[in-house]
């Protein structure tokens, strides 16, 4: 284990030494396979590593690789209360087929209590950024307590913002090391993995839903549309804020 400094709450302190280690390792792993990156993360952070998944095809491939490399790694899903039933059912199929039990992290308020605060008018209609902040960002911050690193399933070719993601970096927003094992792969690679290894995936993908989040903010896309065009369609919002690279959690 490398020398590391912890905060009073047991989180990693982003010391110069740690940031230098992450930058060097990120560069060294640029040409590594996703499996090699995951293996490094599980070895480096052990029980302090966690993974977050929305059960997209990328996340499902990582869950498959984790089942082969370190199935004891804790995995969570941000269960906003607005997920498709197909997504929740996929959690059960992952448990059966891959042996990984994904923990559902829920906001403090149920959907009913949350919507009652705004007179029954859901914030996803009037202020989706606040809704994502309340039902995703704050929940992940709680889930990150006691952890040092998290694995995400983003690919660089998904958006200009994600294109800047390192393989390994410091995630200021959550005070965690962020590991992006799929940064360098493309969508075709992901679906090849799913087919070759019979990895469970969300059946909504067969109905034109290329990127799946909460049902109020997701639609199927037409042929030729960007794969994330169905997320927050008709608004300027393109990300929930989990993967923005700055410290602006309300972005
Ligand atoms: Fe709310 Fe939509 Fe964000 Fe889900 S994706 S948390 S419903 S605004």
Image (spheres, grey):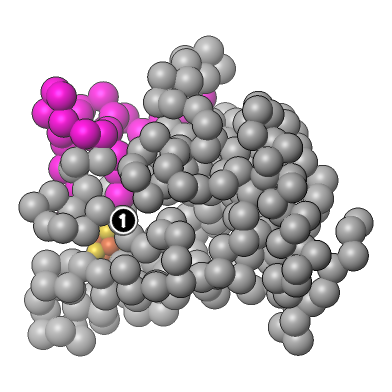
Q: Quadrant of residue 79?
A: bottom left
Q: In this view, does 18 lie to the left or right of 108?
A: right
Q: Quarter holding the N terminus? A: bottom right
Percent x, y for residue 152? 53, 48
Residue occupying the point 50% across, 48% down: 165
Q: Is residue 214 visible?
A: no
Q: Quadrant of ligand 1?
A: bottom left
Pick the residue in front: 24 or 249.
Answer: 24
Give, as a single range, the part of the protein colored magenta: 199-227
The number of numbered badges drawn on the structure is 1
Residue occupying the point 21% across, 34% down: 226
- Name the residue beneath numbered marker 1: 239
Percent x, y for residue 36? 72, 31
Pick the residue in front: 182 or 107.
Answer: 182
Residue occupying the point 21% across, 58% down: 237
Q: Is residue 26 visible?
A: yes
Magenta stretch holds residue 64: no
Q: Name the residue at the top extreme.
A: 196
Q: Is residue 116 left or right of residue 251?
A: left
Pick the residue in front: 142 or 18.
Answer: 18
Under circle 1, the secondary element is loop
Say if 71 sits above or below 116 in the image: above
Residue occupying the point 84% across, 68% down: 4
Question: Within 8 Å: ligand 1 and the Cβ of disc 1?
Answer: no
Magenta: main secondary structure = loop
């Amino acid at each position: 284990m490398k020398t590391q400094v912890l905060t009073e709450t047991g989180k990693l302190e982003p010391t110069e030494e740690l940031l230098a280690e992450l930058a060097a390792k990120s560069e060294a792993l640029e040409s590594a396979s996703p499996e090699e990156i995951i293996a490094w993360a599980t070895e480096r952070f052990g029980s302090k590593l966690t993974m977050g998944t929305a059960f997209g095809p990328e996340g499902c491939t990582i869950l498959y690789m984790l089942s082969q490399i370190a199935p004891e790694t804790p995995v969570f899903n941000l269960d906003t209360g607005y997920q498709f039933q197909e997504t929740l059912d996929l959690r059960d199929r992952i448990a059966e087929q891959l042996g990984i039990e994904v923990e559902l992290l829920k906001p403090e308020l149920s959907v009913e209590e949350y919507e009652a605060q705004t007179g029954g008018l859901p914030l996803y209609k009037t202020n989706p950024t606040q809704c994502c902040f309340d039902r995703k960002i704050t929940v992940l911050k709680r889930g990150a307590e006691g952890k040092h690193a998290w694995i995400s399933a983003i690919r660089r070719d998904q958006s200009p913002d994600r294109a800047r993601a390192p393989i390994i970096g410091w995630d200021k927003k959550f005070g965690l090391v962020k590991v992006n094992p799929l940064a360098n792969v493309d969508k075709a690679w992901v679906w090849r993995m799913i087919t070759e290894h019979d990895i469970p995936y969300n059946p909504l993908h067969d109905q034109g839903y290329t990127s799946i989040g909460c049902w109020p903010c997701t639609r199927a896309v037409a042929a030729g549309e960007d794969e994330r065009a169905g997320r927050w369609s008709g608004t300027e919002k393109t990300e929930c804020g989990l993967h923005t690279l700055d410290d602006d959690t309300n972005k």
